[in-house]
Image (tube, rainbow, N blue to C red):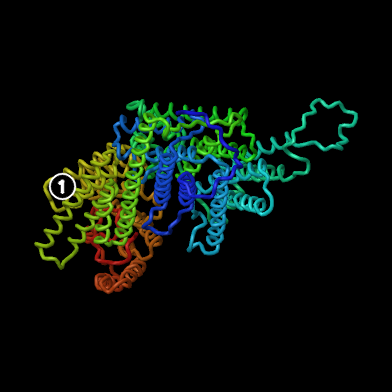
Amino acid sequence: MQTDVHPTSATTPTPRRFSFDTAAIWALIVASGLSAVAFIPSQTVPFIYTKISILAIGGLVALVFFILARLRRGNVIVPPMPLLGALWIVPVAYALSALFSGANFMTAFFGTDLESDTLGFVVLMAAIATLTALAFRRGPHYRAFFKWGAILLGLVVVAQVGFVIVGKIAPSVVTPTVNLVGTFGDLGMMIGLGITLSLLALRFLTITGKARIALYVGSALGLAILALVNSQLVWGMVALVALGLFIETIMKKRPQQDDTDFDGVSVVSGERDMDVAEGDGYAIAAPLVTLLIALFFLIGGSTIGNALVTAFNANVIDVRPSWQSTFDVGSHTYATSPIFGSGPGTFGAQWLKFRDRSLNDTIFWNVDFTSGIGYIPTAFVTTGVAGVLAWLAFLGLFLFFGIRALLFRTPSDTFMRYVSLASFTGALYVFVLSVLTVPGPVVLMTGFLMLGIFVSSLRYGRERREYGVIFARSPRIGFVIVFGLTLLLLASVVAAYVVVERYLGDLSYAKATVAYAKSDLPGATTAVNRSILFAPSERAYQLAAAIGIARMREIVANTTLTPADAQQQFQAALTGGIQAGTTATRLWPKNYQNWVMLGNVYETVVPLNIDGAYDNAKAAFTQAETLSPTNPTLPFILAQLEISKSKGPEAEAELVKAITLKHDYTQAIFLLSQLQAQEGKAKEALQAAEAAAYFAPNDPTVLFQVGILRSANGNTDGAIDALARAVQVNPQYANAHFFLGVMYATKGQLDKALTELNTVAAYSADNAKAVAADIATLQAGKNPFPPSRLGALGIPQTPVTDPTPAGAAKTTAPVQGTPAR
């Protein structure tokens, strides 16, 4: 049976006894609060995913309580339906994209850590908003929500003040940008929302005593923290709200009874709104002061704001693709998959595939962006036209019903009027941010909670209507509803199990990364295997492959193993690494890093001439290059592979490709110069080395190479300049000192040559022994380096080495010292 239900007054007290309805409400409040402030300072505990997991578990617990309440009471009561149904338009579009875009469904649903653009996260947000709209029905429910929300936000602000003070006094202990919410930008968004709701509360609620003082103090501290965040977007939105409230307050201000300004004047309008009494200066002062502060930092954000940020060491770089770059990626994606896009959570793969090559000439050339300019524009790319229509329909319905409710169906109760206005403003605030930037999970969660509160508050409109079904009175309807609720209850239990399982897998993965960084290979292996057991993921298999590579190198360096044991363990590590890398590529074949890791496994054994190792490594690296065609590191990796097989022309072609993609790619230019020097192309090698030195003028390894090649081309003075600069940058660079001495001796400056060789001898006993004869010759006034000996010392040819590892003393000179890097 369906009936119209007229809600009781918002001030009607709720009986103080346990009920599943009350338990559901408190489960939502506690879960959202803990999710917002959860902070465990440990490398082995994932920060953001812990928050998401707390929210998911809390939401599922609340759902279980809500279902039990419905089964016990035999009814379902809902607020006005249109906007409640609109909550699920976007999740439906995400589900269609996940099913028909060609993306892996599990990856589209979970991503790596249930990122905000995944189907799972969007479903979670819609479920939280829906459950909030259904569970919150009484005034005390809303009061508890806003009361505890204000307390938690105050805790966040006070904690941040503490972080800033400690960070200023002892920056080695904690940085000022550490916070309880997420990124520093997320903190600013949350504080901006808190200030907005505080202004609304001061305007529309009667707040007195300590609560009013706490609100003012909290707002003042929030403005101070917001100044450190220095976000022009947040300042702009706070300024708009303050301006609107200031104008609204002025327009409704009650005139004085004894105003003499109008003596003898015919008044055109005599309307007198009683909302704001004369003398209530606080109602005007709060938005006015906030507006002035916001305008001050909007105007002076690049000067005063930046100076303040620098003074407190709160500098944070927020880098995202531009609108143009986001649209470019979207247009390429729509060319192949216009209806359903590339699939939820796949913007990163699309970015790598279609990004502009010119980005390689910026400092962000090696940043793999996972989102576009904003959260909703990113969804436009990943979910296609279906996602675009879904978001536009949802936002359009939200604005239509919201504006209509606030203008024509405003609740008559003062507090419920605030609830309706504050929740609508809070949700709108977050959705505007979602268009213009990428809010973190906590900010998005808050926005959807506000949306749920707003939908719930619609039942208190002027018509004061909600709808209910008493299924206990109708066997047929009751059977369908009870059956559906029971299935939903069982699904909640299964979902809770999956959330806990994936969280345990994430914990194990974090432990594995920490152990791997400490070279604890047994501990890393145990932890990563546990992570794969709980929740198989591409990144866990990537790490397992990396552990396999490290294990193979460890076995090769171990001289205590018998040949049989070494061979057996090496084969096991190789097999495990190949299997892990192959599994990673199978779980998500569009991630180029999976193919790079698989190629690395095969490349490790290429020097051992194992059949198929070179071909498989090249095939994996080539596939990675297909997925990320503008990435200059991939042809560089292929060049190193070709060099390991003594394929000079192929390596040179790959290096030229890498340099074409990134003109200032110093490592590729340097390796090209070494390759050309080995091939006897001294002039070409020098040109490449000098190009590398142009882009890296303080790299002692590059300067050393330039010096050697200048000498090979007969430019001894130029060689001395480069080598002298190398030892100036790194005074302990033994090889540079040695060859600088050789150049001085060649020029006849034997005293300077003797100084350099004495420096080399001072580094170690082995060095002293190696250069003793040369020092004796110099002391006798003779040159120990005739032209016939220069070739033996590596001039004009120098061996091809990998410039990326530490160490530059790879010449035929028998000297030792601190490596160049």
Coordinates of residue 445 in the picture (x, y in percent): 47, 43
Classify residue 149 as left or right of residue 687. right
Classify residue 263 as left or right of residue 179. right
Q: In which quarter of the image is the C terminus?
A: bottom left
Q: How many marks on residues?
A: 1
Q: Quadrant of the N terminus?
A: top left
In the image, farthest residue toward the right: 264
Coordinates of residue 300 in the picture (x, y in percent): 62, 45
Coordinates of residue 632 in the picture (x, y in percent): 32, 42
Q: In this view, does 367 lie above or below 327?
A: below
Q: Is residue 602 visible from the viewing direction of this image?
A: no
Of the pair 598 and 678, the residue shown nearer to us? 598
The quarter of the picture where residue 103 lies is top left
Of the pair 152 and 703, the residue shown nearer to us? 152
> How many residues crowd around disc 1 within 10 Å: few (fewer than 14), some, or many (20 or more)?
some
- Amino acid type at circle 1 is Ala
Of the pair 328 and 228, the residue shown nearer to us? 228
Residue at 34% x, 35% y is: 483
Q: In this view, does 34 lie above or below 279?
A: below
Of the pair 410 and 785, the residue shown nearer to us? 410
Q: Mark 1 points at which residue?
A: 613
Coordinates of residue 745 in the picture (x, y in percent): 31, 64
Q: Is residue 425 visible from the viewing direction of this image?
A: yes
Classify residue 793 as left or right of residue 482. left
In the image, farthest residue toward the left: 564
Q: Say which element carries label 1.
A: helix
